[in-house]
Image (cartoon, rainbow, N blue to C red):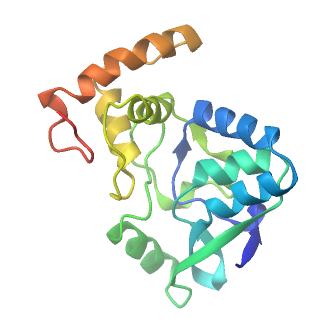
Amino acid sequence: MKTLKISQLRPTQMTHGLREIRQKTEAYERLKGHELEMAIAYKPIPVVYGPDEVPYAIDHHHVATALWHAKVKRVPVVLVKDLSKLSLAEFWLALENNRWTYPYNALGQRVPFSEMHAYIWDLEGDEYRSVSASVRDAGGYAKTSVPLEEFRWADFLRHRLHAPQNDAEFDSLIMKAVELAKSEAALGLPGYLG
């Protein structure tokens, strides 16, 4: 399987959940040798080649960032599409049309593609992205193959719940968020369980 340096991967989103990254980093740091190699191989990073054959990660930003924090230098990648012949504007349009990019900041506001970060570990922390992952893990909604589902849930929760200011508030917010995720207000979101 082809591998690339994590430093070569360009992000296609503006934010990630720092709590989720912290948990994943701790999990990777506990692994050694073959166990670590198997964990890394289990989640190859899907990439799309952009202009000048620059690899852009279109998923697993959290995995790549956690591995980088755990001092892993290279990750396995899977090429999803080669768009290297497109102009930069055409490239970002193709990513958007395929739902392979999420150009929104931690406030849920759209930003220009020119403001995308250069490195995958430099993304903004979005508490609601962490909340959405925790809600899914707690059974609030089902994991699906819908691209960027966690961001849609994060935006839904962002407009209905106050941001947690510390770990205790985060933990108590999850139960409220699970109830909200199962309410009719969430009908239509990917993985809705009702």
Q: Residue furthest bottom?
A: 85
**Residue 166 shows up from this direction:** no
Tell me: 16 left or right of 5.
left
Asked if residue 124 can be seen in this view, the reply is: yes
Tally the numbered discs.
0
Dividing the picture into quadrants, the one containing residue 187 is top left
Furthest residue in direction front, as rendered: 34
Front-lying residue, 41 or 173: 41
Residue 121 location in percent, x, y? Answer: 69, 48
Q: Position of residue 138 (x, y in %)?
A: 41, 28
Horizontal placement of 106 versus 41: left or right? left
Q: Quadrant of the C terminus?
A: top left
Frontmost residue, 16 versus 74? 74
Q: Which residue is drawn at the image coordinates 50% and 28% (left, top)?
A: 127
What x and y, as percent, mark residue 46? 56, 69
Which of the 4 quarters of the picture holds residue 192?
A: top left
Q: Is residue 124 above or below residue 11?
A: above
Residue at the image position 41 percent from the left and 15 percent from the top: 173
92 or 44: nearer the viewer: 44
**Camera-side residue of 130 and 43:** 43
Q: In the image, what residue occupies the spot 22% across and 28% down?
A: 182
Q: Is residue 41 above or below residue 78?
A: above
Q: Quadrant of residue 50?
A: bottom right
**50 to 132, vertically: above or below:** below
Q: Is residue 62 above or below residue 53?
A: above
Q: Quadrant of the N terminus?
A: bottom right
Q: Residue visible at 41% across and 19% down?
A: 174
